[in-house]
Image (tube, coloured by chain):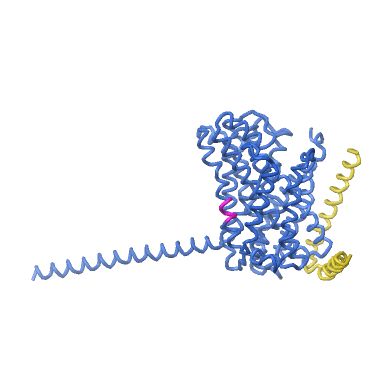
């Protein structure tokens, strides 16, 4: 239980430490990250579809 | 007088000759010292690039190359040669990033892109590394089963051997042992000479770009598999962390790049020799995995088959050494644990525990009767497709962050080359992953 609490506080600490991206959010960076989000979203949808059809 | 004159001229001529002679030898000695100094410097810095590139020829890679040779003979050697710049341009970016930022790839993603992308990459890396590690164990157990070694003995031996290598507490020793295993990876070169291939056929069929049998699904799948084995997500994380752990500085970047270039040439040369072996002896035979290829080769030439099996075991071992370390380094960077091979177990317990746990749990899977190994192999391809594009996009964005990278940021030419390569890898690896999910999609 104590270990779990320690782990949770560690995760919280990491989230706080890296809360704000350090890279300059130029248009190029924003565009690349947006495309990456869409790409991953579509890929996850495909995986879910495959999982459902296999079941 | 004339006699005197002659003797003076003779003396002058002789002294001129000696002086030129000495200049020549001094220059030669100076050049030799300079080259020798560069070689010694290279030998000190060499390691991360060579190890990561040769480990890239892991158990899955050997299977892909063996299948390529068996299916298309020497016809796709030209395509393998194209993979040298692909591998080099992607991996050399990790050298610059690691040497300049002194941070591993996981930490760099967390810090630059925030916790969301950081956790996505770390968790994805953990999955894909673990699944790939299972495939390495499958390859190693299959390879040693050819010599009658039971699978459980192979797993226990590998875990013990890797623990001993890791626990010595020095990065340098670990690296030199890993380089020793890299040397064993060259076993396919004598194997290729032993099968007496036709050099004219290799040159004639292999070096002229061609698509045997026209462009079809099977060929496309194999080409994608070859690219997929050349660039894997763990390689980016491993090399950058390795550069940091070794302590490479900005001044070492050129040597680090040379190391990566030599490594990428060796990895493709080894791949070509595997293609030559199976292309000569198993042309047309259906090859599902490298162990089957080794068994079939043994029927034709016992030693070549044995070399194939030894090479497969070594490839799996090298892959396992690097992949398990890539995960442990990444965890250590984010959780703030001590995470260097230069630390003792007492100083970095979580680093070693995570390494051992990843290794042992992956090693158990091939021992489970009826374990879904085919499904795991499929999953590796699919999960890798979610991580690889993200890791590559982050890599290019980080290399363009002039505030951090300074003079080592990507130049416009480097950006053009790397963006073309990265876009091609992303498109092809996505098609590869999607075709693994939906095998009938492209038929």
Viewer-side residue, B41 vs B168: B168
Above or below B209: residue B315: below
Q: Main secondary structure of the magenta part?
A: helix
Quadrant of the rendering where the N terminus of chain B is positioned: bottom left
Q: Residue at x 83, y 64 (%)?
A: B115
Tell me where residue B325 sits by quadrant.
Answer: bottom right
Chain seen in blue: B
Q: Position of residue B158 (x, y in %)?
A: 66, 49
Range covered by the magenta-colored residues: B177-181
Above or below B243: residue B72: above
Residue A25 in sight here: yes
Q: Position of residue B131 (x, y in %)?
A: 76, 48
Residue B120 falls left or right of residue B411: right
Q: Residue at x 73, y 65 (%)?
A: B349
Q: Residue at x 65, y 68 (%)?
A: B100
Q: Residue at x 61, y 50 (%)?
A: B54
The reply to whether the magenta stretch includes residue B281 is: no
Quadrant of the rendering where the C terminus of chain B is positioned: top right
Chain seen in yellow: A
Q: Position of residue B421 (x, y in %)?
A: 68, 51
Residue A5 falls left or right of residue B2: right
Q: Position of residue B156 (x, y in %)?
A: 68, 48
Residue B86 in sight here: no
């Amino acid at each position: 239980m104590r270990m779990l609490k320690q782990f949770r506080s560690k995760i919280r600490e990491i989230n706080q430490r890296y809360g704000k991206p350090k890279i300059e959010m130029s248009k190029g960076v924003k565009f690349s990250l947006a495309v990456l989000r869409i790409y991953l979203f579509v890929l996850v949808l495909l995986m879910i579809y495959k999982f459902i059809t296999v079941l | 007088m004339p006699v005197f004159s002659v003797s003076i001229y003779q003396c002058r001529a002789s002294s001129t000759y000696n002086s030129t002679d000495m200049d020549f030898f001094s220059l030669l000695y100076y050049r030799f010292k300079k080259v020798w100094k560069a070689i010694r410097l290279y030998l000190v810095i060499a390691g991360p690039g060579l190890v990561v590139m040769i480990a890239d020829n892991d158990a899955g890679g050997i299977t892909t190359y063996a299948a390529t040779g068996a299916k298309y003979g020497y016809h796709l050697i030209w395509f393998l040669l194209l993979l040298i710049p692909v591998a080099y341009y992607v991996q050399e970016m990790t050298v610059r990033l690691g040497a300049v930022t002194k941070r591993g790839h996981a930490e760099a993603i967390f810090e630059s892109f925030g916790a969301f992308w950081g956790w996505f990459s770390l968790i994805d890396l953990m999955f894909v590394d673990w699944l790939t590690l299972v495939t390495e164990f499958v390859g190693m157990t299959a390879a040693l089963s050819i010599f009658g070694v039971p699978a459980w003995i192979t797993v226990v031996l590998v875990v013990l051997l890797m623990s001993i290598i890791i626990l010595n507490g020095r990065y340098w020793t670990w690296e030199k042992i890993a380089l020793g295993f890299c040397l064993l990876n060259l076993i396919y070169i004598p194997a290729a000479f032993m099968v007496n291939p036709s050099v004219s056929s290799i040159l004639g069929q292999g070096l002229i770009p061609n698509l045997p049998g026209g462009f079809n699904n099977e060929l496309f799948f194999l080409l994608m598999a070859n690219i997929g084995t050349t660039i894997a997500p763990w390689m980016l994380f491993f090399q950058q962390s390795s550069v940091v752990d070794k302590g490479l500085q900005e001044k070492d970047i050129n040597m680090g790049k040379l190391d990566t270039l030599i490594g990428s040439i060796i990895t493709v040369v080894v791949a070509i020799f595997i293609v030559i072996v199976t292309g000569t002896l198993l042309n047309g035979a259906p090859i599902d995995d490298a162990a089957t290829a080794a068994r079939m080769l043994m029927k034709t030439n016992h030693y070549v088959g044995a070399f194939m099996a030894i090479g497969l075991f070594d490839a799996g071992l090298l892959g396992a050494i690097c992949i398990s370390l890539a995960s442990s380094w990444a965890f250590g960077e984010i959780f703030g644990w001590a995470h260097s091979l230069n630390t003792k177990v007492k100083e970095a317990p979580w680093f070693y525990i995570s390494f051992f746990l990843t290794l042992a749990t992956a090693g158990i899977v091939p021992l489970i009767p009826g374990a879904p190994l085919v499904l795991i192999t499929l999953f590796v391809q699919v999960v890798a497709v979610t991580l690889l594009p993200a890791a590559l996009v982050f890599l290019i964005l980080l290399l363009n962050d002039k505030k951090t990278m300074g003079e080592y940021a990507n130049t416009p030419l480097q950006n053009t080359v790397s963006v073309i390569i990265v876009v091609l890898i992303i498109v092809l690896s996505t098609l590869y992953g999607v075709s693994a999910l939906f095998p009938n999609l492209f038929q």
